[in-house]
Image: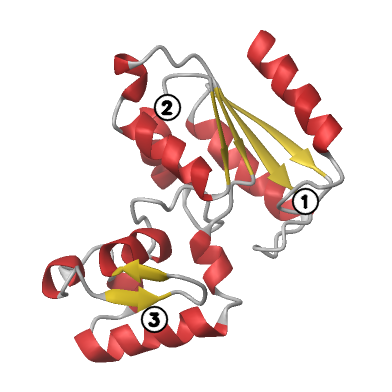
Amino acid sequence: YLIGHSTGCQDILCLCKKGIQKEFPIKKCILQGPVSDRDYVEKEEDLLNEIKRIENEYNIPYKDWNSSDLKNSMDISKYLYDGQYPLLIRRFISLYSKLGDEDWFSFDISQDEFNTIYSCVNIPLLLVFSLNDQYVNYTNEDYQKLIKKIKNANKNINTYILKDDHYIENSKDEFYKLIKEFFCK
């Protein structure tokens, strides 16, 4: 069993994409606090400034990063600043470009794109969203639309929404109950 929080959710899904459940006896996974880094970037001035700088330096619009040769044209050992941490360029692109390697939860992903993204999930997953997650500005209605697309993409995916923030400080008991119920089914 695996439990991932925040970026750990993306890590687990990347492991699913690599077929880790074929190599290791992983039965189920819980992803708590799955958020879109791309949706988060919209409210972070430092990140937006870095994106503009990269667009100008390489003359490739942000919307085209993942479909372009940007990764190949850049010095991948060069670090970029994401507002908190230095990141390698390839990681920056993976996190912040549409359909990048870690773009699993963005609100604007189409149903067909979600179908492709989640086709690698062959084990039961429980996605535990936080209604008041400070990293994205989603309403309950937004979450319902996102959840519907994700669940339609793969029948192995279950979802739950906690009425708390990203770190679920006030919902730990509820989360522990979810863990027990999901893993013991």
Looking at the image, is 180 positioned above or below residue 34? above
| Residue 94: percent from left, percent from top | 34, 59
| Residue 104: percent from left, percent from top | 46, 47
Q: Is 37 on the left-hand or right-hand side of 133?
A: left
Lower sequence index among marks 1 and 2: 2
Q: Amino acid at mark 1?
A: Leu
**Residue 121 marker:** 2
Instruction: Check if mark 3's residue and mark 2's residue have beta carbons within 8 Å.
Output: no
Looking at the image, is 151 positioned above or below residue 114? above
Query: To which quarter of the image does residue 71 belong?
Result: bottom left
Residue at 51% across, 77% down: 83
| Residue 126: percent from left, percent from top | 62, 28
Distance from the alpha carbon under mark 3 to that under mark 2: 31 Å
Residue at 63% across, 41% down: 147
**Mark 2, other Cα within 10 Å: few <14 / some 14–19 / many ≥20:** many
Distance from the alpha carbon under mark 1 to that under mark 3: 28 Å
Instruction: Check if mark 1's residue and mark 2's residue have beta carbons within 8 Å.
Output: no
**Mark 3, other Cα within 10 Å: few <14 / some 14–19 / many ≥20:** many
| Residue 133: percent from left, percent from top | 72, 57
Q: Amino acid at mark 2?
A: Val
Residue at 34% across, 89% down: 53
Q: Nearer the viewer, residue 152 or 159?
A: 159
**Residue 51 marker:** 3
Quarter of the rendering occupied by the C terminus: top right
Q: Name the element at disc 2.
A: loop
